[in-house]
Amino acid sequence: MGKTRILILGGTTEARLLGAALAARPDLDATISLAGRTVDPLPQPVPVRIGGFGGAEGLARYLREKEISILIDATHPFAAQMSRNAVEAAAASGLPAFTLRRAPWQPVEGDRWVPVSDVPEVVSALGPAPRHVFLAIGRQEAHHVNRAPMHHYLVRSVDPVEPALTVPHVTYIRDLGPFRLDDEIRLMRHHQIDALVTKNSGGSATYAKIEAARQLGVEVIMVERAPGAGLPVTTTVEGALNHLDHLLSPAMKRGV
């Protein structure tokens, strides 16, 4: 009997951990797909394909051509378009599919969160008075703050922000988590940060900045997630493995 082919739409820690678990399964043949936006992606435990598919139609075509049996969307919580493509491609191909997405952060006592629906809304939330802003939203949407040149920005991203921002006061840091709480506190104090802008990505790798903001009394402009795309969702790798085993069970394969 041939192996069951699984495509993981990746780019997250969870996708890598799931790939490692599936690599040890002799009954499965898993591939992780990366969008290719990161210049130097981390090594993956299973074969990798890099680049876009050409929308939902292209993804559906790939699923058919590669005889994929199960699709797992383990992309970043803010990769909304890719998640929508996964829903449409799975439906068009008649394949079982589900989402592995870590749970969002929740505010706790001492947090000063200002929720916004998207990055363009951040500019309004920061207000007109000059501030020292820690911009931790990655490089793709950093350009939106060009509309607010009165602030001083500390911009942290994995890859360079290109094109560079046009604001007069900006410092760039290239770094990849996980980050330590003491380092985040030291960084915010050094740059006199009074506003942190971040996306509600969830997970532990970058949560230290949220803890640091809480301890320092720094306001957090929190970009919240859009509603899910419609696939069944599990929030842990263990849950994903259980869901996968359910899909692979004889009863499910018979359609019982």
Image (tube, grey):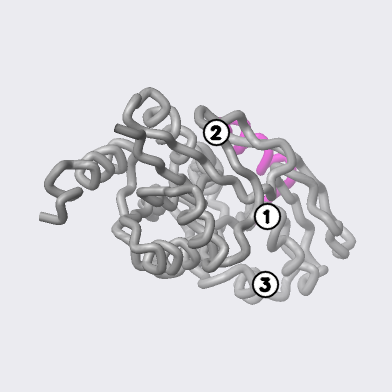
Alpha carbon distance from label 2 to label 1 = 34 Å
Q: Nearer the viewer, residue 155 or 111?
A: 155
Q: Quadrant of the C terminus?
A: bottom left
Residue designated by label 2: 47
Q: Nearer the viewer, residue 255 or 247?
A: 255
| Left or right: where 118 falls relative to 68 | right
**CB of mark 1 within 8 Å of CB of mark 3?**
no
Among the two numbered marks 2 and 1 on one chain, the one whose residue lies closer to the N terminus: 2
Crowding near pointer 3: few (<14 within 10 Å), some, many (20+)? some
| Left or right: where 95 falls relative to 153 | left
Among the two numbered marks 2 and 3 on one chain, the one whose residue lies closer to the N terminus: 2
Among the two numbered marks 1 and 3 on one chain, the one whose residue lies closer to the N terminus: 3
Q: Which mark is residue 123?
A: 3
Please, what secondary structure does the residue beneath circle 3 have? helix
Crowding near pointer 1: few (<14 within 10 Å), some, many (20+)? many
Residue 54 appears in view: yes
Q: Which mark is residue 135?
A: 1
Query: Looking at numbered disc 2 in the image, what kind of residue is underneath it?
Result: Pro
Residue displayed at 79% across by 58% down? 152
Residue displayed at 51% across by 31% down? 46
Q: Which residues are magenta?
A: 178-194
Q: Position of residue 96 (x, y in %)?
A: 31, 56
Alpha carbon distance from label 1 to label 3 = 11 Å
Query: Looking at numbered disc 3 in the image, what kind of residue is underneath it?
Result: Val
